[in-house]
Image (cartoon, helix red, strand yellow):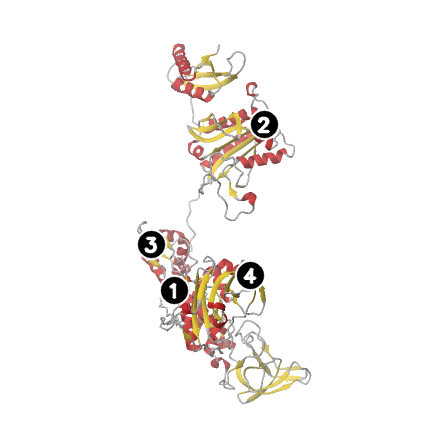
Amino acid sequence: MRISYNWLKEYIDLDLSPEDVAEKLTLLGLEVDYIEDWNKLYKDLLIGVVEEVKPHPETEKLTLVDVGAGGKSFRVICGAPNVKKGQKVVLAPAENTLPNGQEIKKTKIRGEVSEGMICSADELKLQEERAEGIFVLDDDAVSGEKFAPYFNLNDQIFVLDLTPNYGYALNLIGVARELSAAFDKEIKYPQIKEDQESGRAEDLISVEVKNSKLCPRYTARIVEGVKVSQSPWWLKVRLMGAGIRPVNNIADITNYVMLEMGQPLHAFDYDKIQDKKIIVRTAKKGEKLVTLDDRERDLTKEDLVIADAQKPLGLAGVMGGLESEITSQTNNILLEAASFDPYTIRRTAKRFILHSPSSHRFERGIDIENITRASRRAAQLMAEIAEGEVIGGIVDNYPQLKEPLRLRIRPKRVNEVLGTDIPRMEIKSILEKLHFKVQDSKRLEGAFRVQVPSFRNDITIEADLIEEVARIYGYGEIPEDLPRVDMEIGRRRSNQELEAKIREIFRRAGFHQTINLPLVREDESFGTEWPKPLALTNPLSAENSYLRQEILPGLLRSLEFNTKRQVKKAGLYELGDVFPGDGPEQLSALAAVLMGAANSEEWQISAPEFFLLKGILETMASETGVDFSVEKSNYEFLHPGRQGEIFLNGEKVGYIGELHPNLQEKHRFPERVAVMEMGLKNFYTQACLDPEYKGVPRYPAISRDLALTVEEEIQAAQISNLLKQKGGQFLEELTLFDLYRGDQVPENCKSLAYRMVFRSKERTLTDAEIDNIVEEIIEKAKREFGAEIRK
């Protein structure tokens, strides 16, 4: 971006050198690449008059031009097609340097001597694109005078390299606001008169916006009876200093206001709009548009267009259409000022390789509340410069008012982040200088409630406000000392220690750890208790479009992958995150699968995988100091007789069981598969890895074996809980060592054999005491479960 220092000083009083201003802008984050000093660039250029034009004797493409300047005549060999006798031109005599860096030498071309050069606009750095001919001055230019004073080029141009977050500074007033805050000076805004004209714009034009998300606000204003011509020199100089080629007074005014206020504008020939209706819509399939650069564009439904009742008139926010452009025959103007979706504008500009000053600003976000003011400013200039008549009122399609963003900033946090000690009221003053509205927070003592101005689209969180304070306070004022940190030896958190213990236990049991993506299909869940999983807004694929609620489906997928490669025995486990319910809650969980385990005990022959996995669960309990229990459950995806819910100190945390035969067949597992999954939230809070020392027992223990016959539906856990309850403080150890079904027990019954070890820490127990306890256990087991002693 190019900023004229003379133009900038119209909005803020500055008595500093350009170098000092450039340094301050850079410190504010508006980096100045370099300063272009026009006083030096144009010091050797003269105004000349073309006295005679003759063809070059050796080539048709060149001409011999005699240029008079200050009583001298210079022979110049020129190749421009538009050179004519009597023109006032810019002459660069030999042995000088052009503003673009080109050195001019006295040279011989095809046998003829050239004593200088007649300059074009791009050679004078008054425009960026290549000019088609020489730069012709008005007739009032005085031959022999210096070119720079005539063109008011005694100026310095700041060439800024702004990052995308400084979109609000892509205009003169935006830069002036920054300097106003830095130097504590007032801003002088342009004088814009309120609407006082007759007529009603809404009687002459209507506006329809099909999608308010792509175009949150669109305004149209009418200016009648304009005289389209060349702009006055002062306006041309302003535009050329900013790198924009002057076109005509109407187009130049829209560009001038854009540079001044940051609002891109576009002028349509009002008489070429069909049915006097503007429609903001996406392009239709197969539509084409010839843009102002005279190129036909094939539009897609992703392109936003400004159309009338029949056809597109322009690419919204990028470039206008050739058919509705302003020409010398234009009498009436429709002035557009709008806000467009940045992503849509960027996509269209990139696809058509049409990066314009307007699209550059729309892509970074404009001030939606500044639209009508900028439109009014442009209309006022059209009335003054183009002699137009502004029709009263404005058509303003703004269905959803933008609510101002309000943030909280804590002065304590500001100083913590910056390492400073800025007083609370100075923080408030800095923000107010930047046009933030600041009030004391009612909810948090000492904090401020800040309303972000509409032109600051880059401010979204408290950290952004802290950065604003740092910029104005001065980065050079922030201490250079590194923060003092008390160094400590790194160590695992308790959760990490417990996870390491879980990995150790599964590793000892021969399991392999897996890591699966937490992304699944919608139907990839057993749905044990969760509603529909959370969908991703922008998934990578349909296979990975939802957040998982369980780990087990991914483990079974890994197991299936291995079985297809002839693996018949495998144990896999995974520690990972799940996202249960319909909210964004993230919880840690553990899941495991075991296929094809060897028989560890004769009485486990019916379900070795299930019992081995349950044994691992019991090992976890014993080595982490928690109390797991397994009680009967009824999950449809598990074997009806080999499953249970896992409880931790009485609260359900998961399930364990053997995969249902139907699922085993569906996945083509060659062996039975035991599975388990449990949440770790409660486990993390209750488990402990610090061993508790127990001294060597001083008193002997007494053991009793008890075999109870109960009906099949009675769970072993129910009997165990009863034994623990009645065993009381003397019961030191309880072990289920036998499960029997056969001829010696009634049909639909089973025998559970327990070994109980009793001990007192204070004295030697007697057999009579233990016998009484055992009798009480037997009596209660009979009453509650109908148990009988197996003999």
| Residue named by callout 3 | 448
Badge 4 amino acid: Lys
Q: Residue furthest front?
A: 275
Nearest to the observer: residue 473 or residue 673: 673
How packed mark 1 is, by other alpha carbons closer than 10 Å (few <14, some 14-19, many 20 or more), is many
Residue for badge 2: 672
Name the one closer to the observer, 144 or 139.
139
Residue receiving disc 1: 182
Q: Report the amino acid beneath label 2.
A: Arg
- Residue type, mark 3 in image: Phe
Task: Tell me the CA gap for discs 2 and 1.
Answer: 75 Å
Q: Nearer the viewer, mark 2 or mark 3?
A: 2
Residue 13 vertical placement versus 414 (above, below): below
Q: CA distance from mark 2 to mark 3?
A: 64 Å
Mark before the other along the chain sequence, 1 or 3: 1
Dot 2 or dot 1, earlier in sequence: 1
Q: Residue at x 38, y 60 (%)?
A: 453
Q: Amino acid at mark 1?
A: Ala
- Can you tell which of label 2 and label 1 is closer to the viewer? 2
| C-beta proximity under 8 Å, tags 1 and 4 | no
Where is residue 186 drawn, in percent x and y? Answer: 35, 68
Secondary structure, mark 3, is strand
How far is disc 1 from disc 4 in space, using C-alphas? 36 Å
Q: Position of residue 527 (x, y in %)?
A: 50, 35
* Residue in the foreground of this view, choosing between 277 and 531: 277
